[in-house]
Image: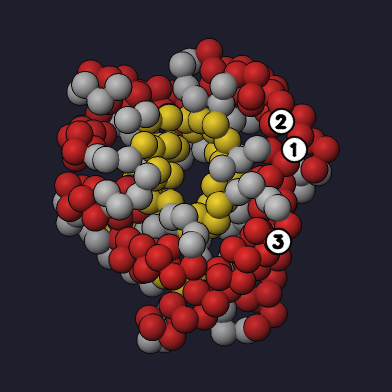
């Protein structure tokens, strides 16, 4: 089944030059990153959508990083919902498929309490997306720290109960569990999905989980490639390393060499 590879962001090239460079390197995906806020206008989004279509590039959106749907303060929850909804609106005009976001933090509370709060917000947002006619899927992301809501188990349950999609960040899994992850088990657990939106890159972690993304090595890619040989779903894999375009190219080459493409 098909796998699309691409970078998170254009490495400062802008969308016109960035999409051209991404396509020239044989990549077929780009995640647009609204890291610090959604400043793109709808008209600009439509222009970028046209460029992406002309190059055959599949787009997704990463919502702003400051999101906590389970914040202890109600106003922070509502602000987080607003940022995600703004991302969905732009994503619709971009022709994007998935709206990626980090759902929230436990902050010392019972995980079930946090799950209930996040689930209510996600369910409401899924309904809002349908009501607006936006052709996007909410895709909460597997997170890289044990203090964050976002295990595969939690996100699968969220998907089943709200109808949202999920983003499986395989590098975050390594950081979340201190490298003690069997990708074969993860992939087997995902075989009920038709398409998986995912992230992978080199990553550095410590006792508290994720520290930072680092360049992606062949040695890091191979275990994931091996596990994905048994996949029963199509995929998009976004690389978020400091050099995401070249590392996405490297990932595609390794997957090809391993017979997955």
Q: Which residue matches tag 1? A: 45
On screen, residue 116 above or below 210: below
Residue 2 spot, x, y in % from top left: 37, 29
State whether residue 208 appears in this view.
Answer: no
Label 2 belongs to which residue?
Answer: 48
- Mark 2–mark 3 Cα distance, whole angstroms, equals 24 Å
Please name which of the two marks, 2 or 3, marks the residue nearer to the observer.
3
Q: Is residue 201 above or below residue 68?
A: above
CA gap, disc 1 and disc 3:
20 Å
Q: Position of residue 158 (x, y in %)?
A: 43, 68
Quadrant of the image for the N terminus?
Answer: top left
* Rendered residue at 60%/49% (across/down): 136
Image location of residue 225, percent across then percent down: 23, 33
Q: Are marks 2 and 3 in contact (CB under 8 Å)?
A: no
Assign a secondary structure to mark 1: helix
Dots 1, 2 in contact, CB < 8 A:
yes
Q: Is residue 42 above or below residue 139?
A: above
Choose top left, top right, bottom left or bottom right for residue 152.
Answer: bottom left
Residue depicted at 37% across the width and 30% down the height = 3
Mark 2 burial class by Cα count in 10 Å: few <14, some 14-19, many 20+: some
User: Which residue does the numbered mark 3 point to in the structure image?
Assistant: 131
Tell me, yes or no, if residue 139 can be seen here: yes
């Amino acid at each position: 089944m098909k796998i699309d590879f691409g970078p998170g962001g254009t490495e400062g090239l802008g969308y016109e030059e960035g999409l051209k460079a991404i396509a020239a390197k044989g990549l077929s995906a780009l995640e647009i990153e609204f890291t610090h806020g959604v400043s793109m206008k709808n008209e600009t989004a439509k222009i970028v959508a046209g460029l992406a279509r002309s190059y055959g590039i599949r787009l997704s959106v990463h919502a702003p990083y400051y999101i906590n749907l389970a914040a202890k303060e109600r106003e922070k929850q509502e602000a987080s919902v607003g940022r995600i909804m703004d991302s969905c609106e732009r994503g619709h005009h971009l022709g994007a498929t998935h709206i990626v976001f980090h759902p929230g933090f436990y902050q010392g509370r019972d995980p079930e309490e946090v799950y209930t709060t996040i689930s209510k917000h996600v369910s409401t947002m899924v309904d809002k997306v349908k009501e607006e006619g936006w052709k996007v899927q909410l895709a909460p992301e597997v997170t890289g720290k044990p203090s964050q809501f976002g295990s595969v188990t939690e996100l699968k349950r969220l998907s089943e109960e709200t109808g949202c999609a999920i983003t499986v960040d395989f590098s975050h899994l390594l950081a979340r569990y201190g490298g003690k992850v069997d990708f074969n088990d993860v992939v087997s657990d995902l075989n009920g999905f038709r398409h998986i939106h995912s992230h992978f890159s080199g990553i550095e972690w410590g006792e508290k989980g994720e520290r930072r993304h680092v360049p992606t090595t062949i040695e890091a890619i191979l275990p994931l490639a091996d596990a994905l040989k048994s996949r029963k779903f199509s995929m998009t894999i976004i690389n978020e390393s400091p050099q995401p375009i070249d590392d996405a190219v490297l990932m595609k080459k390794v997957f090809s060499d391993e017979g997955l493409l």
